[in-house]
Image: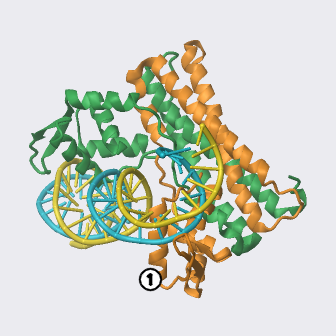
Chain colours: A green, B orange, C yellow, D cyan
Amino acid sequence: MSLLHAVLGFVATQPMTGYELGKAFSTTAAHFWPADQSQLYRTLHRAEADGLVESTTVEQASRPDRRLYSILEPGRAALKTWLASPLEPDTSREPFLLRLFFAASLGAAGVIELLDQRRSSAVELLTTLDALAASAPPKFSKPALAIRLQYATLESGRAHARAEITWLDELRSQLADPKESTR
Amino acid sequence: MSLLHAVLGFVATQPMTGYELGKAFSTTAAHFWPADQSQLYRTLHRAEADGLVESTTVEQASRPDRRLYSILEPGRAALKTWLASPLEPDTSREPFLLRLFFAASLGAAGVIELLDQRRSSAVELLTTLDALAASAPPKFSKPALAIRLQYATLESGRAHARAEITWLDELRSQLADPKESTR
DNA sequence: GTCGAATATAGGACTAGTCCTATATGGAGT
DNA sequence: ACTCCATATAGGACTAGTCCTATATTCGAC
């Protein structure tokens, strides 16, 4: 149930509409927390019903009215509690590894094809993250902590993408040239 | 809906009961595909209803009867189709990154504590994977493809765990010693 | 001039997964 | 004596998330 906390986190920095929240997610947090548009609005509704945020309706002429959400004290408290709560162990699913695990029936050539597909996705992701990192670099020596942390999540994505590519390359060469399989 | 495919993958190698399947998951695939026990049995039921697997009941004296599942042709076909289907882009959630992204209000010291907690989990994971890798090493020069691929998923976990630790260390030292924050 | 994208919100239907509980018994540990 | 763990399967309640659709307008592209 962390989408709620993400929503609170964003809204705590400044009042936003659901639409803006969606933008914020897709431009800054998409690679580690994809947010479904419907789910976002539902989460906002629930947060308001629970008294964590409040909304004011801003009327617009030729567009649907905007609902501007602001955080309330209970919301800020919930955010704080979440930040201080113990880290639960990761239980993430890796569809690619699952596939690889059972891919033997594709034969070595088929597996290599699979690895190549995966590699190009990883490269694509890496270049996207590189571009993001380049477009918002912390050039000054003492950026605000928040900025640094946001940048750090980008760095994390890049580090993992690089690790993925290296691992893929090693596995590929091992499979392509069976002589090298010492250990 | 990949648990189904994982189940088919396991059952295709040899007939198994739900219980054995649970063991197989937790000992070999847990780090990239946690399988809930209830969900496993439900998936088996559905797979049988869909004609992908069949089960024979093995009566036991002082234990509940075992239901031994075997794969059927349609199941094998479904497995093959899945293996050949296009790789969809990853949309995994990273609760830790989400937290870090919004962790500025903890202050530098609080964030460092968070990083340290994360680091010890990562180290713990890495040592678990190291132990697994050591206990089942492909010592012979030409192991079967299936064995190699299963080993490769372990290697993937290790590579990512190492990348995570390195990233954490870099971030930590950058936060702990603000002078070094060039770029 | 038509088609899609951006702006802006929202509901319906569905699915996979989680957590808890139930049932039954034998064996190992303290 | 008591509790916990392993064996073995299964249902109930719930939740978060996905996918699709609806509504309404304006602007730019081709």
Residue A165 lies, in percent from the top left, at: 67, 50
The answer to whether residue B65 is visible is yes
- Mark 1 neighbour class, 10 Å CA radius: few under 14, some 14 to 19, many 20 or more: few
Q: Is residue B149 left or right of residue A40?
A: right
- Residue B39 location, quadrant: bottom left
**Mark 1 is on which residue type?**
Ala
Residue D22 lies, in percent from the top left, at: 17, 68
Q: Is residue A167 left or right of residue B94?
A: right
The answer to whether residue A163 is visible is no
Residue nearest the observer in this picture, C8 or B70: B70
Q: Is residue C18 left or right of residue B137?
A: left
Which residue, given by chain and number where applicable, does mark 1 sit on? B49
Residue drawn at (12%, 47%), measured in percent from left and top?
A: A65
Q: Secondary structure at mark 1?
A: helix
Q: Chain of mark 1?
A: B
Residue drawn at (62%, 51%), measured in percent from left and top?
A: A123
